[in-house]
Image: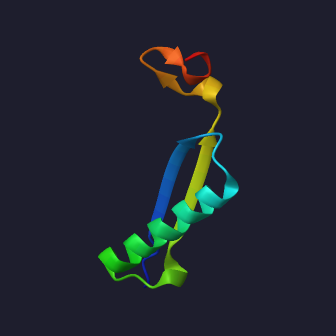
Amino acid sequence: MRKMPLINVQIMEGRPPEKVTELIQNLTNTVQETLNAPRESIRVIVTEVPKTHWGIAGIPASER
């Protein structure tokens, strides 16, 4: 049975799509190298959280 690594990342919204793509590529490379996992088995989920839903020190990031 093949194990499928799953990386789940939450980031604050607002980054350009090419930076999200670069993040996915870099995470995939790191997992492949670290776990010796085949690339085709690696999954990455990036969830962008609205700044209104991201709290820092009790204040929404949208208000900082």
The image quadrant of residue 37 is: bottom left
**Image x and y of residue 61, in percent:** 56, 23
Q: Residue at x 34, y 79 (%)?
A: 33
- Location of the C terminus (image quadrant): top right
Q: Which of 12 and 1 lies nearest the eye of the viewer?
A: 12
**Image x and y of residue 25, in percent:** 53, 70
The image quadrant of residue 54 is: top right
Tag count:
0
Q: Is residue 16 above or below residue 6?
A: above
The image quadrant of residue 60 is: top right
Report the residue that reaches farthest toward the right. 17
Q: Residue at x 63, y 46 (%)?
A: 15
Report the residue that reaches farthest toward the left. 34
Please say which color scheme the image uses: rainbow
- Location of the N terminus (image quadrant): bottom left
**Image x and y of residue 20, in percent:** 60, 57
**Image x and y of residue 5, in percent:** 44, 70
Is 29 on the left or on the right of 62, as rendered?
Answer: left
Q: Residue at x 64, y 23 (%)?
A: 52
Q: Is residue 61 above or below residue 5?
A: above
